[in-house]
């Protein structure tokens, strides 16, 4: 049941991306998509059950440690992208007076 | 020691960049050329050893079981790309060095990007690939927004968000593959993909990965970020982006679709052919109506990517090789065109195509190379575009509808370059010349290579691809006639329709796709691909 | 055992939907912070404490703070006042007050906050381009007018022109961004 | 296309994707593969000497990934700084809104919280191979602790250029430390102690790497935050 719910989080994020009118909203939605992806990875990693991947005593089944190592990387990547996008946002606001996609993409031919 | 060279390819440019950033001295920046020289020498040695013993190209980092460790792997494909990258970066550095010498940060980002791109080409691990994909996205975003004016900031954020979304889908695909095969090593997956290839989950992973790659390589309908980004950047960067970095997506396509999943596994050849044809047509139509020199070239990149896709979709044989060759050829002539256009824009202080006249009389050397670029891109015999374009149509030369699409693209390309060539004619204009021999060195080198490949394609083909390219004939009367007819049709089309600037032309020119629509199309793309794969094939 | 994770996941989806449909960006920051916390809880329930620590530290502390700064910067209307207030006589002083009243109402119409600054040296054009100054006010003694300068690309300047075109003591100058030729 | 039609069709398309996902995952357990889990479970502790399997993976098996994870932070910091910086000298500029003071309660509370968080962050970094945590997480906590300083006194700012320089040098040191293993073991990017070394020796490498990564990450995050605070000021 869980992986499906995680996938729904991703889909909600994508829905938000396709209806959001301003840049900040799009950045929020990217954050949602990223969190959903991480959750999906971890859900599937704990698919067969197990305990925290720290050695307490051999013989107890652990969950898959690889997704966790990879997902820490994904969180760092996501945070850097968010901060870069937000900095671009500030600059765009003071340049165009607005952060609506419609306004900033209006003709500059 | 030789097996360590891949790691050197990655870290030499990165360390060079960091040193430039830390020292902040304009004389120290010349070490970029030293690092390019070292790279070229190492590359020569590496290729020499690779030919002697191909096993040298596989390196396991950490020395663990290679199913679980990160590995770097080189093959003919990645080695050609590496050679091309080193050449392109050297030419672009020559071109940009004098004007950007004091901007340490620009060179820092450029060198870092080279290291990351070389790493991206060599890695044999899917998650590693994802990290490099994101790093390239971030680096290009920063380089695009380097000017900090309105259009560049706007292009940067559009590029960043759309490509991040694409990379996220790539990641979901990786997740599914990991839980089905227990490994994310590309070589391991390539050998074992047959175990579960008909399971729906693997198909879904395939679709998600391919969708992510399609954003990266600007296929229809996900190309909207490309003209924005490539049109506003510095000229040197535009050349690099259009010539090389956008091919990163196609490289991934070859790695994932053709090699890893196996091109025949899901019978997607026709689908990708038509996606490629649509991309090419839309790109060429959009290019026809533009009024800005750089925008024309940027839109042409889209259409040429479509052409490459038409060839690559076959996955084997001469058409596939034609697609591969077209990647290299396009890198050469598109960067040549961009660099020449950059020189012209600098001298005339405008980008408007109708405001520039008399280039041939005022800037003869530049315009000769511009003409070489234009002949190459439109596929004239004796130039490199001709060879690859002839190869691409090998597999579908008997199918009339496909040939019709292909011909349309060619006519469109020729027409828009007739429009482009209007800037050459006219009276001489007095310009204050920027004396910089270095810029001409890079243009000269690229132009020579264009002609060189166009004439000596047979030995090159047998050396790189091990194929006999005698199918392509230089003195084929039909090809010459075709080319002349294209020029005729193109001239009529230009004179009586495009040049008059009718209403439809203006409407297409004012076409803008908002970010929401781009996302909507992305979802549409994913669902239609999955519909085709799950229910039609 | 599986009830709590499922409930939390449904809560996560509800918060995500709230983020997507809510209009006010400042309120969304609260949502995104709690989104991060619930996600971190779910990571722990999926036996991943390492990821949860990273998510709590980055996803619900540093990133929301950056959002706060970024959004509050996007609600500012930065005005650089270059009028030498010692030189103004009384009649102009009245007009100056009127000008500020107009600006205040304009800023409130656009749901912004006015941030007045002073004492920055540099040419007007470079200031608007490099620093985030939205409007520069100066006084021209010959024309007896206040001159407001801003960027042409900004829609706020369009609104301002519409609002003030009937006032004769205000003149608006806009800078057009030059074509970049590199 | 009107917004309503677009939204409805969007929901339909997303519903279709969800449907495909649900039908695909229904018999996922038949092809579920846990090779990776079994491999790390059997060998992880002996190979890396880390009680925390996750730390073992990202500091040993996949150290190459972590290097570039540090690199992406480095690039983002440099990029954010590049976009926000400007050539105009504005030292004596005065802004009206920035004169507001932080409430006294906040300041007192932050003074209490700040050393505790700093200690906790350092604890998480140093014990990364024993308990949950490690360089990235601990670095982020340390950065948060340093950010609390801004609440106490907004005028006290870090010199960002020094931070950036240190960060880049740390990255070079990180790469060189990671590649030391070539001299001792003949393979790149792993622990520079031998495979049969004792747990304590391996812990030296793990702690060293965690500290380096933690320092780099915390400096990077602080620099990003400072760039945002100073933006346009």
Image (spheres, grey):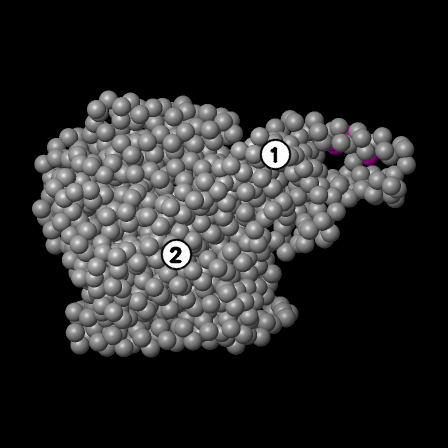
Element on which disc 1 rests = loop
Q: Chain of mark 1?
A: D
Whether residue B467 is visible: yes
Looking at the rendering, which quadrant does residue B186 occupy? bottom left
Q: Residues within 10 Å of mark 1 (few under 14, many from 20)?
A: few
Quick one: label 2 or label 1, which is nearer the N terminus? Answer: 1
* Residue at position x 67%, y 37% in the image: D99
Q: Are marks 2 and 1 in contact (CB under 8 Å)?
A: no
Q: Which residue is mark 2?
A: D212
Q: Which mark is residue D102?
A: 1
* Residue at position x 57%, y 64% in the image: B346
Looking at the rendering, which quadrant does residue B26 occupy? bottom right
Q: Classify the position of the C terminus of chain B by image quarter.
A: top left
Q: Give the magenta part as a residue range.
A: C164-169
Q: Foreground residue, C46 or D146? A: D146
Cα distance between the residues tagged 2 and 1: 34 Å
Looking at the rendering, which quadrant does residue B122 occupy? bottom left
Judged left or right of residue C159, residue D222 is: left
Q: Position of residue B189 (x, y in %)?
A: 16, 52
Q: Position of residue C123 (x, y in %)?
A: 72, 52
Element on which disc 2 rests = helix
Q: Position of residue B116 (x, y in %)?
A: 36, 60
Q: Classify the position of the N terminus of chain B by image quarter.
A: bottom left
Whether residue D73 is visible: no
Q: Is residue D74 above or below residue B362?
A: above
Q: Position of residue B362 (x, y in %)?
A: 58, 71
């Amino acid at each position: 049941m869980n992986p499906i719910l995680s996938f729904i989080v991703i889909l909600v994020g994508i829905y938000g991306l396709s209806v959001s009118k301003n840049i900040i909203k799009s950045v929020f939605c990217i954050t949602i998509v990223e969190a959903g992806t991480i959750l999906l990875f971890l859900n599937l990693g704990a698919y067969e059950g197990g305990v925290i991947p720290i050695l307490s005593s051999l013989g107890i089944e652990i969950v898959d440690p690889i997704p966790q190592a990879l997902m820490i990387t994904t969180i760092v990547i996501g945070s850097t992208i968010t901060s870069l996008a937000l900095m671009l946002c500030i600059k765009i606001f003071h340049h165009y007076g607005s952060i609506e996609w419609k306004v900033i993409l209006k003709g500059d031919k | 020691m030789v097996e360590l060279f891949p790691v050197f390819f990655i870290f030499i440019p990165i360390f060079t960049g960091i040193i430039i950033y830390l020292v902040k001295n304009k004389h120290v920046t010349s070490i970029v050329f030293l690092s390019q020289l070292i790279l070229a020498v190492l590359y020569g040695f590496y290729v020499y050893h690779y030919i002697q013993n191909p096993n040298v190209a596989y390196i396991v980092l950490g020395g663990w079981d290679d199913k679980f460790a990160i590995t770097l792997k080189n093959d003919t494909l990645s080695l050609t790309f590496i050679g091309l990258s080193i050449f392109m970066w050297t030419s672009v550095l020559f071109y940009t060095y004098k004007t950007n010498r004091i901007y340490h940060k620009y060179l820092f980002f450029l060198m870092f990007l080279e290291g990351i791109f070389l790493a991206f080409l060599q890695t044999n691990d899917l998650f590693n690939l994802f990290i490099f994909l994101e790093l390239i996205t971030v680096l290009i975003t920063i380089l695009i927004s380097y000017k900090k004016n309105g259009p560049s900031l706007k292009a940067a954020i559009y590029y960043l968000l759309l490509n991040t979304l694409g990379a996220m889908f790539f990641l979901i695909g990786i997740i599914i593959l990991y839980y089905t095969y227990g490994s994310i090593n590309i070589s391991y997956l390539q050998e074992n993909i047959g175990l579960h290839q008909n399971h729906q989950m693997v198909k879904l992973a395939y679709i998600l990965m391919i969708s992510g790659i399609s954003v990266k390589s600007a296929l229809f309908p996900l190309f909207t970020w490309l003209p924005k980004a490539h049109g506003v950047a510095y000229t040197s960067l535009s050349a690099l982006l259009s010539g090389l970095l956008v091919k990163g997506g196609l490289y991934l396509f070859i790695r994932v679709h053709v090699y890893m999943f196996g091109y025949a596994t899901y019978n997607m050849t026709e689908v990708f052919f038509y996606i490629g044809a649509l991309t090419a047509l839309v790109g060429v139509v959009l290019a026809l109506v533009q009024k800005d020199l750089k925008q024309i070239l940027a839109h042409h990149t889209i259409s040429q990517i479509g052409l490459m896709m038409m060839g690559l979709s076959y996955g084997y044989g001469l058409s596939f090789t034609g697609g591969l060759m077209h990647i290299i050829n396009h890198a050469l002539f598109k960067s040549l065109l961009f660099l020449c256009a950059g020189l012209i824009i600098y001298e005339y202080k405008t980008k408007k195509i109708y405001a520039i006249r008399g280039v041939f009389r005022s800037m003869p050397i530049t315009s000769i190379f511009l003409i070489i670029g234009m002949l190459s891109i439109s596929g004239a015999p004796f130039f490199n575009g001709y060879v690859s374009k002839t190869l691409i149509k090998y597999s579908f030369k008997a199918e009339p509808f496909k040939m019709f699409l292909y011909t349309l693209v060619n006519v469109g390309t020729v027409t828009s370059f007739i429009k482009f060539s209007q800037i050459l004619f006219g009276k001489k204009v007095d310009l204050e010349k920027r004396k910089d021999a270095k810029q001409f060195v890079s243009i000269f080198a690229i132009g020579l290579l264009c002609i060189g490949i166009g004439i000596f394609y047979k030995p090159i083909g047998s050396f790189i691809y091990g194929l006999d390219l005698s199918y392509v004939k230089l003195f084929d009367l039909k090809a010459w006639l075709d080319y002349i007819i294209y020029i005729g049709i193109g001239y009529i089309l230009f004179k009586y329709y495009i040049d008059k600037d009718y209403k439809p032309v203006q409407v297409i020119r004012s076409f803008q796709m908002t970010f929401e629509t781009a996302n909507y199309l992305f979802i549409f793309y994913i669902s239609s691909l999955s519909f085709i794969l799950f229910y039609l094939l | 055992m599986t009830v709590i994770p499922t409930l939390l996941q449904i809560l996560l989806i509800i918060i995500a939907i709230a983020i997507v449909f809510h209009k006010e960006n400042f309120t969304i920051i609260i949502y995104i912070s709690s989104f991060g916390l619930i996600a971190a809880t779910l990571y722990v329930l999926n036996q991943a404490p390492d990821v949860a620590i990273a998510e709590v530290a980055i996803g619900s502390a540093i990133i929301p703070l950056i959002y706060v700064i970024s959004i509050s910067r996007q609600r500012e209307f930065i005005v650089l006042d270059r009028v030498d207030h010692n030189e103004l006589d009384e009649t102009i002083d009245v007009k100056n007050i009127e000008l500020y009243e107009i600006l205040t109402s304009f800023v409130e119409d656009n749901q912004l906050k006015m941030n007045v600054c002073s004492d920055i040296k540099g040419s007007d054009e470079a200031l608007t381009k490099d620093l985030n100054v939205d409007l520069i006010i100066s006084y021209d003694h010959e024309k007896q007018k206040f001159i407001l300068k801003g960027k042409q690309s900004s829609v706020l300047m369009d609104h301002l022109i519409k609002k003030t075109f009937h006032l004769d003591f205000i003149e608006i100058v806009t800078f057009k961004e030059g074509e970049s030729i590199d | 296309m009107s917004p309503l039609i677009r939204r409805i069709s969007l929901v339909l398309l997303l519903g279709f994707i969800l449907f495909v996902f649900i039908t695909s995952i229904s018999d996922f357990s038949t092809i579920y593969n846990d090779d990776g889990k079994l491999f790390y479970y059997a060998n992880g502790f002996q190979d890396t000497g880390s009680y925390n399997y996750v730390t073992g993976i990202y500091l040993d098996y996949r150290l190459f990934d972590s290097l570039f994870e540090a690199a992406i932070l480095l690039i983002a910091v440099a990029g954010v700084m590049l976009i926000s910086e400007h050539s105009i000298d504005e030292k004596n500029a005065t802004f009206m809104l920035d004169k507001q003071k932080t409430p006294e309660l906040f300041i007192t509370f932050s003074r209490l919280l700040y050393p505790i968080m700093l200690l906790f962050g350092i604890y998480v970094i140093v014990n990364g191979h024993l308990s949950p945590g490690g360089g990235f997480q601990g670095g982020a906590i340390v950065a948060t602790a340093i950010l609390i300083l801004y609440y106490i006194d907004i005028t006290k700012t870090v010199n960002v250029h020094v931070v950036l320089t240190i960060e880049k040098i740390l990255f070079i040191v990180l790469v060189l430390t990671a590649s030391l293993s070539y001299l001792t073991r003949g393979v790149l990017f792993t622990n520079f102690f031998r495979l049969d070394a004792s747990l304590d020796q391996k812990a030296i490498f793990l702690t060293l790497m965690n500290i380096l990564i933690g320092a780099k990450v915390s400096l990077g995050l602080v620099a990003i935050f400072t760039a945002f605070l100073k933006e346009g000021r």
